[in-house]
Amino acid sequence: MTVYNFNGQACSEGKIKAENLNFYYGNFQALRNINLDIPGCAITAIIGPSGCGKSSFLRLLNRMNDLIYGSRIEGTIELDGKNIFDKDVDVVDLRKNVGMVFQKPNPFPISIFDNIAFGPRQHGKKNKIELEEIVENSLRKAALWDEVKDKIEQSALALSGGQQQRLCIARVLSVEPEVILMDEPCSALDPMATLKIEDLMRSLAKNYTIIIVTHNMQQAARVSDNTAFFMMEEDRSGSLVEYGSTSKIFTNPKDKRTEDYITGRFG
Amino acid sequence: MRNISAKQTQKIAMAGIWGGGVITLLLLIVIIGYVLIQGLPGINWEFLSTNPKGGLSGEGGILSTVVSTLYLIGITLVILVPLGIGSAVYLSEYAPNNRLTRIIRYGIETLAGIPSIIFGLFGYALFVTALSFKFSILSGALTLVCLLLPTMITTTEEALKAVSYSYREAALALGTTRWQMISRIVLPSALPGIVTAVILCIGRAIGETACLYVTMGGSAAMPSSLLEGGRTLSLHVYYLAMETNAMGKAMATAAILIIIIILINGLTNWLAGRFQRKMKGIS
């Protein structure tokens, strides 16, 4: 089956492949037997009630959960056919390739320019002209350039919440990732700012693989090509209930629990 | 007693808080004011530019003691600051939460509570005698480092912990190494707190007398190297007040001491502010 994204592009299948994935915080199992095949150059939404493990799953994809003491993984996640948990995978390179946008906008307390230039600088780019080019391109791609081009040396903390979040997206773009993970990127934003981020996501999907965790079902329906529905089992571990094209999940779900959730009967 | 309304409770609480603030400020003004009023008339060029000559009337000035003090503080900070920040970074960013770490923390807390004269005796035994640095500025500085390290570490660690976890996540998610994240984001963000730690340590270093008396000796001669003894300003104040009848000179020396503390604090704050502005890209 060939999947097409919003822009009519054919998605490459199997960009990210989770197989028999189990994830534990200490003795607590947070994810149970996840199998998920995420296409490239598409937007995949992960929805589900609070505590269903959707954020935990997202944070496995760039191994941010490595930071959590006592967490443990079974199974594999393949990125372009390579298991990201293999010993020879450098987690620093992985995170460069798989960027992340967080729930709360988190610009560094430095200038707008330095925020965007931070990643490239740490990866060895020192040339001022080259850095200026990267900063401008990243801000343009994040639809923020016109709003900030005259105050690029000012503190990023002076921007509005929505601008800060687009700045964070620009910061991710500056290190040229292939995949962008978004963990409820609009939950701290007002509807107008949310709309802007959603437009931005669609334009980015031409060139990037985007995976978004959201508890806003309308948002999933609006922006995503595919939707995965996660839910808690009785032991509170999260598992994948249903996965398919967004139109199918929202109009004709196969599983009763998916239907109950998207029609607002729980969650 | 009748029930007091919420508004009245608020008034009483505010009065208490204001009172506390005013008393603190008054104390500060009275002490500094008293020392300055008593001390400033005794300060003149001769006082500043000659060494103490000794004697019951406290002849001479304070030049060598100022030099010894600045010398001592400089050497102490050069050793203390990197060591303290390094330990704090280890404890806050790298140390796993295990028994060894708990023992280290317990050790630091215990050290922080030990009286300075005990550090003085230790410094005398180790630096002055065993390592034969003699009574010297080096012995004094190394002893001060031991004394101040717990303060430096705990205050710096608090500053590091106050840096939002979201900055750390954002930096790591951009594919930086842990060290890049710490050196480029966490340490600069924690700088105001680290400066506070340094100022705190400078203040204590300037105020120490007992532990320096047994490691630096009390020579009032001008020190010409690290391995010579010296007398700090505080020690000189003590000496003037207890061994001579030159109370005016003691006050004048105390005034100089206070002025030096204010200058060093101002300088440290200014440097930190400049660095932070540069980091925020305002410069």
Image: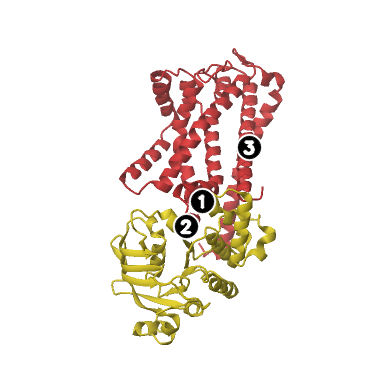
> For mark 3, what is the residue?
B267
Q: How far apart are marks 1 and 2 (CA)?
A: 9 Å
> For mark 2, what is the residue?
A96
Q: The red chain is which one?
A: B
Q: How crowded is mark 2: few (under 14 residues within 10 Å), some or many (20 or more)?
A: many
Residue B218 against residue A81 in the figure, above or below? above
Residue B277 against residue A201 in the figure, above or below? above
B251 or A184: nearer the viewer:
A184
Q: Answer with mark 1 or mark 2, whichever residue precedes in sequence.
A: 2
Q: Are marks 1 and 2 in contact (CB under 8 Å)?
A: yes
**x and y percent of residue B167 in the render?**
50, 55
A96 or A215: nearer the viewer:
A96
Q: How crowded is mark 1: few (under 14 residues within 10 Å), some or many (20 or more)?
A: some
Q: Which residue is drawn at 45% across and 19% down?
A: B133
**x and y percent of residue B177 in the render?**
45, 50
Looking at the rendered image, the quarter that the N terminus of chain A falls into is bottom left
Amino acid bearing label 1: His
Give me the chain letter of mark 1: A
> For mark 1, what is the residue?
A123
Amino acid bearing label 2: Lys
Q: Residues within 10 Å of mark 3 (few under 14, many from 20)?
A: few
Residue A85 against residue B19 in the figure, above or below? below
Give me the chain letter of mark 3: B
Q: Distance between the residues labelled 1 and 3?
A: 34 Å
Q: In which quarter of the image is residue A28?
A: bottom left
Q: In which quarter of the image is residue A193?
A: bottom right
